[in-house]
Structures are given as structure tokens and as C-alpha cells.
Amino acid sequence: NSTNIASTGTTGKNYGIYSSSQANNSGNIDFSNGVGNLGIYMVNGGTGRNSGTITVGASDVSNELFSVGMAAGYIGDKTTAATTGAIENNGTINVNGEYSIGMYGAQSGTTVTNNKDIVLNASNTTGIYVENNAKAVNNGSIRTGASGLSNVTGVVLGPGSTLTNNGTINISGTASKGALLKGGTIANYGSITVSGAGSKETDSLNSTPTTKILGPITINAPAGASTATITANGVTVTPTVVKTAARNPITVSANSIGLYVNTSGKDYTKSITGLGNLTSEADLIIGTEASQSTTSKYIQVNDNKILDPYNNAILSSGVSKWDIYSGSLTWITTPTLDPGTGKLTNLYMAKVPYTEWAADRNTYNFADGLEQRY
């Protein structure tokens, strides 16, 4: 293709070139308008090369509509099989909208190669993102092209993915990163330079245990585990799973401390965008509303309708550290997290016996009576 392509509407979800064979682009693809646009997308082992200028605008994170200059492969899901591809940039990719990506690749056998320029002109943008064992090579330049940016990342490496950097990664912005390792590895033969408060040349999203213990209750969540085990007095118990019923939005105010998560499955609190502008660390305070729909002392929340608003916040807020805990003295709560993204996969809740807070025999006897009637 040597013809210029442009998006004119605001809806988005456009493809400039979609191919499973060989595709070469020397024209300019201007997808500044609309969200969820892809300049070049390669599947089924196809190879795409760009020597023109590709420009993409903003993304809609809540609806998973990401604007990407060049993309290859797909990790697969229940309805679509995994696929691979190869992309090579010999021109310029301008990333002008928040949460958008210059080049993306997924799946073993997929390769992403940048030989020239990826320019990041907005906050919360990423130069190259590869995951699920895809390979990235940077022989060119990945850099910021504007001042006053924040949360910009040169390269993100998901599980099993690799980057060979022979070129330059030059990122300027608050709380930004040259390379973010989410289970991937980097071989750096070039240069990675970052500047700005709270910025790092390389950073990692390490998978750590989220196990919690309080009195006789243990919620065991090993590092990288998608599920947890609850034991009470050494005996494994099965939690009751709470699902969503009707959804009634409740507006919640943001502050520099954190966000409250309503777990009722009926009412739901809406997450706050731009929380990273308030603080680099924030809390998710887990409410005990789920206990209103069951008499069980052990509860599991895995409904995406409850978790998704907060997963969107984890992915897009710019907050680098989340502390997740119960909002009630008599309940203990811990999550399991996706090791590649840090998203919530489950919330586990267990009631702590009232007797745990008794300081003397009389108080203990009273608390024990309450506990037996719970």
C-alpha cells in the first residue's frame, strides 16, 4: 500500500491493513480520530512492514479498545484461536493518545521489530508491548516527543517475552519507565535513558504471595496463584461464591487514600479515573456487603462485573502500588492477582471470630456467645 489512509469519524475500531500474508506500507496512516484503531494488523503467520508514518489517537481502556500502530498475533480466548505474525517498522509511528501503543505482539512465534522511530506524545502510552512468549527487537529509537508527560513506558515485556535492545530508549516523564518486566526478560546492547520524578530505567511487576493470617484464619495465596485456599483452625473450608444480581451504580469520591469496593453484587462503586494524579500508592478497601447475601463465614468474589472497574483502575490509573485489605475489623480479605498484569482474579473473604479481639475472660465469653449465634 502506498496510498494515504485516514480516519475521519469519532467511533474508531478501524483497520488500515489487516492481513495474513505479506503486507508492505509506504503510505501514511492517520488514525488520530476515534478509539481502538489499528494501523497494521498481521495474523496467521503474516509479515507486515511499514516505511511510512502511522499515527494513532486515544484508547478506551474500560471497553478494551486500544489504538495500536502495528500489531501481530493474538493470545486466544474461548471464541478466537491464538495466532502469530511478524511486524517491522522502518518508518515513524506516532502515539498521540493516552493508553495507546506503538507496536504490539503476542504469542510464541510472533516477532516485533522496530528499526526506526516510535514517538510517544501522550501520557500513559507504551512504545512496544509484547506478551505470551513473543519477541521484540529494537534497532531504532523509542522516545517521548512532548513535555509534561507521566506514566510513559518504552517497552512492556509480558510473561515469557523477550526484548533485544540494540537501539535507544529515551523516556522523559513523571513515574515513567524505560522497560517494564511483567515476566519477560531484556538483553540490552543499546541505551535506556529515563528522566522525571519517580522514573526508572527498568522496573518489574514481581509476583508475590498475598497470603494473610489473622488468628485461626489463614487465606493462603501463593505467588502467581489464580486461586487461594482458606483454612480455619487448620481445616480447609470452601468459600461461598457471590455473584452479581442487578447493578446499581454508587458514586464514590476519590482521595489520596484509596477506593472502596462494594462486594454486594447488587450495588457497585465506580472506579475513579486519574487516581495516579493524586498518589503513586493507593488502597482498595474491600467492603463486606457480600456477607449480606449468605450466612457463610467464607466468601469468594470472582464476578468480573464487580472486579472489572477496579481492574481498569489497576491497569490505567498510573498508581504503582496497591494495598488491598478489608474495610471491616471482623473480616480478613486478600486477592489473587494475575502475575502478568497485576489484575484481580479473585477476592477471598473470611470472618474473624469475635473472640480474637477479647482481652479478658468475661469479654471472651460474651464474644464466644455472639460467635456461636452468627
Image (tube, grey):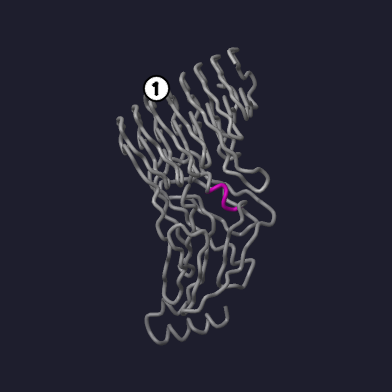
Q: Position of residue 24 (x, y in %)?
A: 56, 20
79 in relation to 303, above or below: above
Q: Does residue 86 appear in the picture of this structure?
A: yes
Q: Residue at x 55, y 25 (%)?
A: 48
Location of residue 44 by image quarter: top right
Q: Disc 1 marks which amino acid?
A: Gly
**Where are the magenta residues, as a range?**
306-310
**Residue at (56, 37) in percent of width and height:** 84
Mark 1 highlights which residue?
Answer: 145
- The quadrant of the image that shows the C terminus is bottom right
Q: Does residue 311 appear to the left or right of 144 in the view shown?
A: right
Taking 355 as reference, is 43 above or below it? Answer: above
Q: Percent x, y for residue 129? A: 47, 36
Q: Secondary structure at mark 1?
A: loop
The 10 Å Cα crowd at callout 1, few under 14, some 14 to 19, many 20 or more, is some
| 258 in the magenta segment | no
Please tell me in which quadrant of the rendered image residue 290 appears.
Answer: bottom right
Q: Residue at x 45, y 80 (%)?
A: 355
Is residue 194 at all visible to an observer of this figure? no
Closer to the camera in the image, 27 or 170: 27
